[in-house]
Image: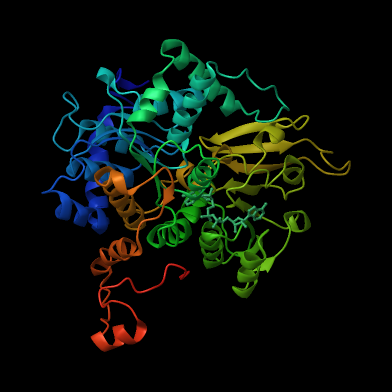
Amino acid sequence: SFDELPGRYKVRSLASAEAGRHQIRLAEHEMPGLMALRTEFGPTQPLAGARIAGSLHMTVQTAVLIETLVALGAEVRWASCNIFSTQDEAAAAVVVGPHGSVDEPAGVPVFAWKGESLDEYWQCTEEILVWPGGTGPNMILDDGGDATLLVHKGVEYEAAGAVPSDPQPGEAGYSEEYLVILGTLRRSLAADPQRWTTVAAGIMGVTEETTTGVHRLYQLAEAGQLLFPAINVNDSVTKSKFDNKYGIRHSLPDGINRATDVLMGGKVAFVAGYGDVGKGAAEALRGQGARVIVSEVDPICALQAAMDGYQVARLDDVIDQADFVITTTGNKDVVSAAQMARMKDKAVVGNIGHFDNEIDMAGLAAVPGITRTEIKPQVHEWTFPAGTGDEAAPERSIIVLSEGRLLNLGNATGHPSFVMSNSFSNQVIGQIELFTKPDDYAREVYRLPKVLDEKVARLHLDALGVQLTELTKSQAEYLGVDVAGPYKPEHYRY
Ligand code: NAI
């Protein structure tokens, strides 16, 4: 069941708004960056006139982001960027708003609930892009790039005059989700053959949260197909070197514990990928006392993992040892069904990369004789019949978290507020940049200037009691920097 007002909101239950509001209040205390931006920019309202379509996990932390955008003058509509990541009480609280009531909601339109179907997911994404009264958004705030993707695919197919026919299983591009996207666009093309062209023409820019979405943006820009300017929030240092690493260090074990409560200490944990997310994942698992094995394709990251003291191996070679297998690559086809069939009995398998194509869930479901038992929502036991893969193999099962979707948001509540305050401060600053300086940005992908990155970090120091040392004028001259920063050249890697 839902609480919904067509075109205005659709959430699980407004009755949970009060619980959500309490959590938002506590989160505000842990999000000093966002609260400082409210104080700094509230009086000048730089986002007045901005109509922001947001597609980002609808959590308590995101609620604080949404209400910060509103405090700076923006009109906002929101959907989640994953079918399992919404915290229903946060969605309800945002719809009701800080000054509204369950009977008279006065907050932001939200279209999100935990456990959407793929069809519902893309309907919600459409809701944030097609506003009532004939207006549309003039800004997108994206995480993973699905809102941007829908606009770009829509424009492409409108120009072609038709949506391509569905690929068949086994054909290039086939996925259950792609069929849903095609269906969504077919319906919209029938209703309005210029819908996405009109939406795209109104959009001044997008700010993108995550590694995977940023990849998509650079691909579009390189192909000359990017329809509006983009700010890569992910590669602000205060985003990827904090959220992707320290956020995962917190929320990966949180997800595993809430899902399974299986002890990690003493066990073998395999982590695929040693980028920012992999580094946080490996550190967390080691912190719990697990023996961690890492895999990498990049020799630099593989060497880093080795120097950090991890065994670096291929999944195939250690698959029979791992009690936990966690994917963090943002790549596809990292764990195959055949590999899952060779895992230890009751091994826990989960993905924390953005999309669900790292683990071959379709291949798993197609293993002859396999059965799936729901232990609880987002925790499933897959049982291989005796003889799977090897005649002598006994019956055994593995535990798959969040159906292969990002488990820290599916099984837990994502990253904690303090780290998200860093990420979301970059988002807010990115929105202000693109909205207030349209002439400064072409249809390319930009990063925020380093001085703003340093500003985001600065906003979080007091809360941790950090005492920063100040350069003297002569030290600054010696280093060739300004006393007020930026302190590092662009190529510095942190
Ligand atoms: P990254 O690019 O820093 O790291 C990914 C690493 O995986 C790279 O070092 C790459 O060489 C490696 N890799 C690629 N293919 C591989 C393979 N087949 N086997 C082993 N290693 C392989 O990216 P980052 O920032 O660590 O992000 C990874 C994913 O996590 C992305 O999809 C990103 O969007 C997502 N993400 C998820 C978060 C969450 O809360 N769940 C938070 C932040 C990012």
Above or below 251: residue 230: above
Q: Residue at x 30, y 83 (%)?
A: 476
Q: Is residue 23 visible?
A: no
- In the displayed orientation, state which residue is furthest to the right: 391
| Location of the N terminus (image quadrant) | top left
113 relative position to 361: left or right: left
In the image, is 215 to the left or to the right of 384? left
Q: How many numbered markers are drawn? A: 0
Which corner quadrant of the image does residue 106 belong to? top left
Q: Tell me where residue 413 appears, x and y as whole percent.
A: 41, 46
Residue 50 shows in the view: yes
Q: Residue furthest top?
A: 190
Res 399 → quadrant:
top right
Q: Is residue 320 above or below residue 16?
A: below
Name the image quarter holding the C terminus.
bottom left
Image point 59% across, 37% down: which residue?
Answer: 380
The residue shown at (51%, 46%) is: 218
- Left or right of 117? Residue 267 is right
Q: Determine the image quadrant of residue 364.
A: top right
Residue at 66 percent of width and 22 percent of height: 167
Of residue 433 and residue 369, the one placed in the foreground of this image is: 433
Q: At which x and y percent is residue 217?
A: 49, 43
Colouring chosen for the image of the structure: rainbow
Residue toward you, 408 or 166? 166
Image location of residue 142, percent across then percent down:
40, 40
- Which is more toward the observer, 140 or 414? 140
Where residue 215 appears, x then y in whole percent? 53, 47
The one nearer the camera, 207 or 489, is: 489
